Image (tube, rainbow, N blue to C red):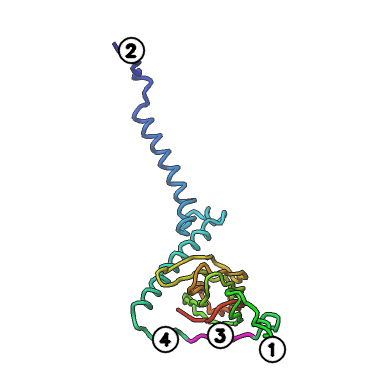
Amino acid sequence: MYNANKPIASELPSTGKLLKSTGVAAAIAAGLLVTIVMPAEYGVDPTRVGSVFGLTEMGRIKVQLAAEAEAEKAAEAGAATSAAGPAPALESTPITLPTSATAPAVAATGAAPAVPAAQAGTRSDRTVLTLAPDQGAEIKLVMQEGATVRYSWSSSGGRVNYDTHADRPGTSYHGYDKGSEQRVEDTLTAAFTGSHGWFWRNRTGQPVTITLVTEGAYSEVKRVV
């Protein structure tokens, strides 16, 4: 009734062939795990192959950034739930802006010119931080939604891990950018009214000095960590 062809015993793979195929597949998977996955995801490179293709450094940065994010969340949670002492002292120096960067003067007989909310309160500051090995620090600017800040920061002693982000009541984290650099220059536009800024972690093994220069519409510079 059924004409299904039954395989001949000689056509079926032997137990030895099956074991050999399984062994080859397992060896390939193990090779990929050791040479690609472990270096790229965890920074572990027992064969040194990942270093040749830059995978090991990428994996180490991923691991460090993940650790920084967890440490930062823990620090923020601790600050929010405990009556800890004041934040570390902040060395922030206001920079006098040229007249062209400030709001125009009001004429004696005319009304005050309208200034867009995102440009109101324009200021400039230079903030300097010194980080010991493995130390982290966080600087935040208090900004209104849509406000823009031009900024640049640099490290005196090599690359440092950084995370540019924001928070507000009800939003513990909003990311803008993260990575590992010695200098960054960019523009930040506030996604919402709240605190916007940078977290750095020094993994160089030596003390470094972070110099941050900001210019734009913000009302306060504060050190959170």
Q: What is the magenta range?
A: 89-95
Q: Residue at 48% x, 81% y: name it.
A: 223
Residue 74 rendering spot, x and y as whole percentages:
38, 72
Q: Nearer the viewer, mark 2 or mark 4?
A: 4
Q: CA distance from mark 1 to mark 4?
A: 45 Å
- What residue is pinned by disc 2? 3
Q: CA distance from mark 1 to mark 3?
A: 36 Å
Q: Residue furthest bottom?
A: 108
**Quarter of the image containing the N terminus?**
top left
Residue 116 rendering spot, x and y as whole percentages:
61, 74
Q: Residue at 58% x, 81% y: name it.
A: 121
Whether residue 70 is visible to the viewer of this picture, yes or no, is yes
- What residue is pinned by disc 4? 86
Residues 159 and 79: in front is: 79
Mark 4 falls on what kind of element? loop
Whether residue 161 is visible to the viewer of this picture, yes or no, is no
Q: Residue at 52% x, 67% y: name it.
A: 191
Task: Report crowding for label 2: few under 14, some 14 to 19, many 20 or more residues within 10 A (C-alpha).
Answer: few
- CB atoms at circles 3 and 2 under 8 Å apart? no
Nearer-N-terminus badge (1/4): 4
Q: CA distance from mark 1 to mark 2?
A: 105 Å
- What residue is pinned by disc 3? 92
**Quarter of the image containing the C terminus?**
bottom left
